[in-house]
């Protein structure tokens, strides 16, 4: 608690000073807490707990330089990894309007809308998107906007399959764009080192479609080693999500399927994919209701439920997400 108090005091003191200088564009806190009940054939388990507590800072230094910081206040700071609770600490440079270079700690660029969503906006994850050792890493990257709403991006960063600052990296190429005004995309190709010195390749195709009050996401992830007998569709995830907006209410549904063939192991029996194990045939699905009492994102109440074929149980969660704006320009 003492470390947290010192961190908060330091953040707000720094933000106050930079706000006076006109550099802070946005400073806000968001949090989510939930009550969760998990039921299977022989047991009922419940938990009431805070889940997320984050401080966000966005700022502009001048017409070419900007920055972003996000700190998780509910994650302890580890002396062996002092940036463990820091998701974003990034400096951006735009030498031209359509070119951005950045360096610092950022999100690891893997496509798909489930992966890209803020954790506080996801009630249950796929095995793949929930299985990385880290989601934010020190990185350097560049983005080139070649047409309105069409951006190519490259990034090199620490591998998401490790938690250390060693010689394991991820090399990421992405397209953030759209096929039509109603069809947006986050597509990436990734070459990722794992702790055993091997490499695995991801193809991540995230699609977000909107038709009036209906929004639909469809994510496809293909995972493969160059040594696999079958490159496509022997190790993959398929995730769909629907949100229908009615006034201040969202009605949500989600369905996913993940598969990894038994044969996707090397000659020593080690899995090429260290997240979704060989032999996996996993499906899950669920529903949700969200209510926004203020008509905006500042307060959101939720009730959601989901089930899968591994635990053969059912989980229901209900709670609130809250956002407090301190500085908003």
Image (cartoon, rainbow, N blue to C red):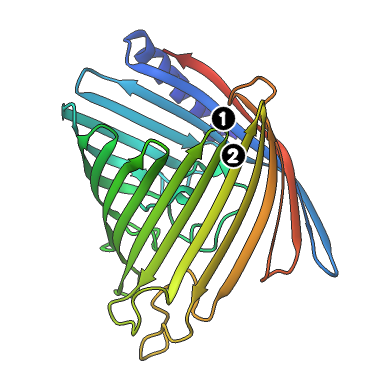
* Mark linked to residue 117: none
Q: Are marks 2 and 1 in contact (CB under 8 Å)?
A: yes
In which quadrant of the rendered image does the N terminus lie?
Answer: top right
Q: Residue at x 66, y 19 (%)?
A: 294
Classed neighbour count for the residue bearing mark 1: other residues with Cα under 10 Å, few (<14), some (14–19), many (≥20): some
Choose top left, top right, bottom left or bottom right for residue 183: top left
Q: Is residue 248 above or below residue 191?
A: above
Q: Judge by depth and name the residue closer to the eye, 91 or 172.
A: 172
- Check disc 2 and report the residue beneath it: 52
Q: Is residue 9 above or below residue 317?
A: above
SS under mark 2: strand
Choose top left, top right, bottom left or bottom right for residue 273: bottom left
Q: Position of residue 242 (x, y in %)?
A: 58, 46
Left/right placement of residue 257 relative to residue 96 reads: right
SS under mark 1: strand
- Check disc 1 and report the residue beneath it: 30
How far apart, in angstroms, are the residues tagged by discs 2 and 1? 8 Å
């Amino acid at each position: 608690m003492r470390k947290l108090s010192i961190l908060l005091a330091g953040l707000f003191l720094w933000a106050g000073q930079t706000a006076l200088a006109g550099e802070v564009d946005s400073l806000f806190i968001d949090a989510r807490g939930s009550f969760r009940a998990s039921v299977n054939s022989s047991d009922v388990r419940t938990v009431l707990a805070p889940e997320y507590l984050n401080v966000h800072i966005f700022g502009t230094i001048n017409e070419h330089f900007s920055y972003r910081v996000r700190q998780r206040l509910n994650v302890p700071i580890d002396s062996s990894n002092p940036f463990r609770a820091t998701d974003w600490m990034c400096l951006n440079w735009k030498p031209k309007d359509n070119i951005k270079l950045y360096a610092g700690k950022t999100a690891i660029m893997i496509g798909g809308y489930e992966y890209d969503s803020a954790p506080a906006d996801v009630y249950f994850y796929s095995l793949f998107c929930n299985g990385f050792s880290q989601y934010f890493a020190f990185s350097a990257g560049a983005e080139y906007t070649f047409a309105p709403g069409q951006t190519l991006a490259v990034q090199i960063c620490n591998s998401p399959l490790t938690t250390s600052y060693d010689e394991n990296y991820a090399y990421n190429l992405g397209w953030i764009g759209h096929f039509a005004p109603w069809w947006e995309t986050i597509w990436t190709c990734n070459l990722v080192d794992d702790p055993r010195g091997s490499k695995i390749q991801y193809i991540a195709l995230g699609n977000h479609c909107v038709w009036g009050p209906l929004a639909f996401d469809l994510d496809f992830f293909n995972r493969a080693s160059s040594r696999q007998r079958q490159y496509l569709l022997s190790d993959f995830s398929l995730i769909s999500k629907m949100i229908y907006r009615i006034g201040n209410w969202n009605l949500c549904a989600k369905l996913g399927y993940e598969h990894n063939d038994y044969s996707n192991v090397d000659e020593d029996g080690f899995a090429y994919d260290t997240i979704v194990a060989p032999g996996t045939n996993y499906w899950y699905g669920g529903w949700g209701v969200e209510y926004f009492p203020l008509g905006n994102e500042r307060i959101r109440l939720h009730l959601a439920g989901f089930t899968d074929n591994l635990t053969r149980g059912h989980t229901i969660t209900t709670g609130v997400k809250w956002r407090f704006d301190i500085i908003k320009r």
